Amino acid sequence: MGVVNVTPDSFSDGGRWFDTTVAVKHGLALVAEGADLVDVGGESTRPGATRVDEAEELRRVIPVVRVLASEGVVVSVDTMRASVAEQALAAGAALVNDVSGGLADPAMIPVVAAAGAPFVVMHWRGFLQGGNVKGRYEDVVAEVVDELHARVQAVLEGGIAPDRIVVDPGLGFSKEADHDLTLLAHLDRLHVLGHPLLVAASRKRFLGRVLAGPQEAPPPARERDAATAAVSALAAHAGAWAVRVHEVHATADAVRVARAVEGAR
C-alpha cells in the first residue's frame, strides 16, 4: 500500500503531493514501483495535527481518487469522515482506511456497510492533539488484541461483512516506541482476530528512535525508508496482508526477499 498524502502538514512528506496533478503523478509512480494499492488521504493524523474541515478534505481527496481510479489504480481512501468515504467510494475507491476504526464518525460504519467495501479497523484510543494520549499499557499486545476484537465486533454488528474487515495494530497511535516494537515482535498474536493484517510502520517515530540510539536526535522521517523496508520484510514473514509505506521500491524488494526465503524452506 503506497501512501499519497494530499496534505501540507504530513509528518513525513508534508506539502510534496498537495497539488492534485502532482499527487496523481506520485500515485501512478508508486504503482510503477510495485504498489498494489494506493492510500489517498487529505488529513494529517500526526500527533498535534489540527483537523481540516470537511469541505477542504473533500477538495483535496476526491479529485485524486477519481483520476487514479480512472487509470485502473486500486485506491484506498484514508479518512475518518463518512462523507469523504462515501464520495471517495463513489469516485472509484475500493477500500476505506479509517484510523479511528469508525469511532470518529458514527455514520462511517453504515456508509461502508451500504457500499459493501472493505474496511480497515485500526487500534485507536482517540485523537492525538496535545501529544500521545492514553499510551499506558500493562500488556500492550493483549490489550491491543482485546480492544481490536471489541471494535471488530462493533463493526460486524454495524453490517460490515467479516470478509470485508482488515485489522491494523495502530503503530504510533497512543503508543511509545517500546509498545510499537513489542507489537511488531508479536504480530502473530494478532492473527487470532481472524482478519487480514495491515502494518503501517513507515517512517514513524519509533524507527527514528531505534536508528538514533539513546544519545542522538532521530533522523528525519525521509531517512527512515531502509528501516521501514526492514519492518516490511518482518511483517511479511509474520503473515501480514499488506504494509503501508511512503517509499515503495525498497519495501517491494524486501517483501520479495522475505517470500523467497520462505519458499526455500
Image (spheres, rainbow, N blue to C red):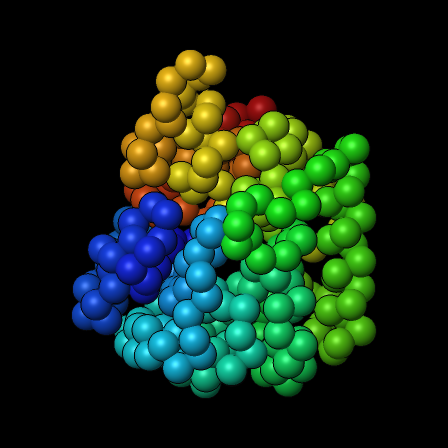
> In the displayed structure, would residue 249 be above or below residue 151?
above
The residue located at (61%, 39%) in the rendering is 175
- Name the quadrant of the C terminus: top right
The residue located at (68%, 45%) in the rendering is 134
The residue located at (46%, 26%) in the rendering is 209
> In the displayed structure, would residue 79 be above or below residue 169?
below
Q: Position of residue 107 (x, y in %)?
A: 64, 80
The residue located at (49%, 41%) in the rendering is 201
Q: Position of residue 112 (x, y in %)?
A: 61, 77
> In the displayed structure, would residue 53 be above or below residue 233?
below
Q: Residue furthest front?
A: 130
Q: Position of residue 110 (x, y in %)?
A: 67, 81
The answer, for residue 188, to whether it is visible in the render is: no
Closer to the camera, 265 or 138? Answer: 138
The answer, for residue 152, to whether it is visible in the render is: yes
Quarter of the image for residue 39 reads bottom left
Closer to the camera, 66 or 32? Answer: 66
- Name the quadrant of the N terminus: bottom left
Q: Position of residue 5 (x, y in %)?
A: 34, 59
Marks counted in the figure total 0
Closer to the camera, 101 or 195? Answer: 101
Left or right: 68 as drawn, with respect to 184: left
